[in-house]
């Protein structure tokens, strides 16, 4: 599940191939009001619960009973809500670069918030320049590459350009304190956060791991609020190790008693 103002292209092919090489079937999709998914009319409103229900509908369409739910930033908030409201469809949860909605944890600085909500120019070149300047504010210091980011923006623009109204609707959906709901999550949960994240600072991830029962926390040194190739090995490992461990436990629990291997 991708973040605010993004598309499924956030999860680049190389990243998805890394997870596939670890034995997983990867499903990426556009949220409502993003990419090639439905753009809602002016005045429409929705919640994280609605966005989580969209993902349930996608699993239904694919014939998938349950899945490892992975989300980044706003997508992490959707993933958390999915796990809280649809426990039987959640094999495990990985919440990345997100927070709990509590006002005291994982909040951007004033400078970053001003940049985030500033209107995007209509001119494509000016818009790209603004997006790049914004990205530099919260990117991974050692892994950020202007050329790579600009190529990503070109890919976004070739598919779809998100309207200001759609951006505001997604921003509004992510508002609010979710801690009461997060305390009900029963799925095995891993929280992944970067130490260099200035958009949703690491206190948001630390708080998420404290609130979700049994969650563990993986802090990635030098990772900001982006998905640069330099961070992929650590992220792929964090996701695949967690999901693989859950799958192993799931398979063991499915073995009937006295299955011929001497165990009960």
Image (spheres, rainbow, N blue to C red):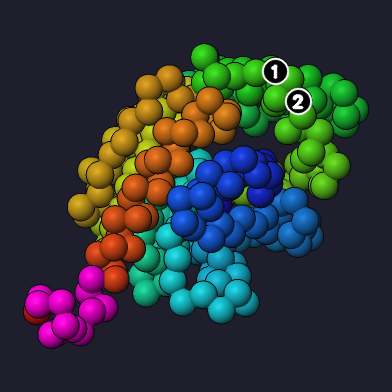
Magenta stretch, overall SS: loop
Q: Is residue 210 left or right of residue 228?
A: left
- Seen at 34% across and 43% down, the residue is 191
Say whether residue 262 is magenta: yes
Secondary structure of the residue carrying numbered label 2: helix
Q: Is residue 203 magenta?
A: no
Q: Are marks 2 and 1 in contact (CB under 8 Å)?
A: yes
| Residue 62 visible to the viewer | yes
Residue at 81% from the left image edge and 26% from the top image edge: 127
- Residue of label 1: 146
Residue 140 place in picture, x, y as percent? 52, 21
Work out how far the residue at label 2 is from the one at label 1, CA to CA, in angstroms. 6 Å
Q: Position of residue 120 (x, y in %)?
A: 77, 30
Q: Which residue is situated farthest in the top direction here?
A: 142
- x and y percent of residue 164 in the render? 75, 41
| SS category of the residue bearing label 1 | helix
Percent from the top left, x then y, of residue 177?
Answer: 38, 48
Closest to the observer: 139 or 240? 240
Magenta residues span 252-263
**Position of 147 relative to 151 (above/below):** above
Judging by the rendered image, the residue that carries numbered circle 2 is 150
Q: Residue at x 78, y 19 (%)?
A: 129
Horizontal relation, residue 187 to residue 223: left or right: left
């Amino acid at each position: 599940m991708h973040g605010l103002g993004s598309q499924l292209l956030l999860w680049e092919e190389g990243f998805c191939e890394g997870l596939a090489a670890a034995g997983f079937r990867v499903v990426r999709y556009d949220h409502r009001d993003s990419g090639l998914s439905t753009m809602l009319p002016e005045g429409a409103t929705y919640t994280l619960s609605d966005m989580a229900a969209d993902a349930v509908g996608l699993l239904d369409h694919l014939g998938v009973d349950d899945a490892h739910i992975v989300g980044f930033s706003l997508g992490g908030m959707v993933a958390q809500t999915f796990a809280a409201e649809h426990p039987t469809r959640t094999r495990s949860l990985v919440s990345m670069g997100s927070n709990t909605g509590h006002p005291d944890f994982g909040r951007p600085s004033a400078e970053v918030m001003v940049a985030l909500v500033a209107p995007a120019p209509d001119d494509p070149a000016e818009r790209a320049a603004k997006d790049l300047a914004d990205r530099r504010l919260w990117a991974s210091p050692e892994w950020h590459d202007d050329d790579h980011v600009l190529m990503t923006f070109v890919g976004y623009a070739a598919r779809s350009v998100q309207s200001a109204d759609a951006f505001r609707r997604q921003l509004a959906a992510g508002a609010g304190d979710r801690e009461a709901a997060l305390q009900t999550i029963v799925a095995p949960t891993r929280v992944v956060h970067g130490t260099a994240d200035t958009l949703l600072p690491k206190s948001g991830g630390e708080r998420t791991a404290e609130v979700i029962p049994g969650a563990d926390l993986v802090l990635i040194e030098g990772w900001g609020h982006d998905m640069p190739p330099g961070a992929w090995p650590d992220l792929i490992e964090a996701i695949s190790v967690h999901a693989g461990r859950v799958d192993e436990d799931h398979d063991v629990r499915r073995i009937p008693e006295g299955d011929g291997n001497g165990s009960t």
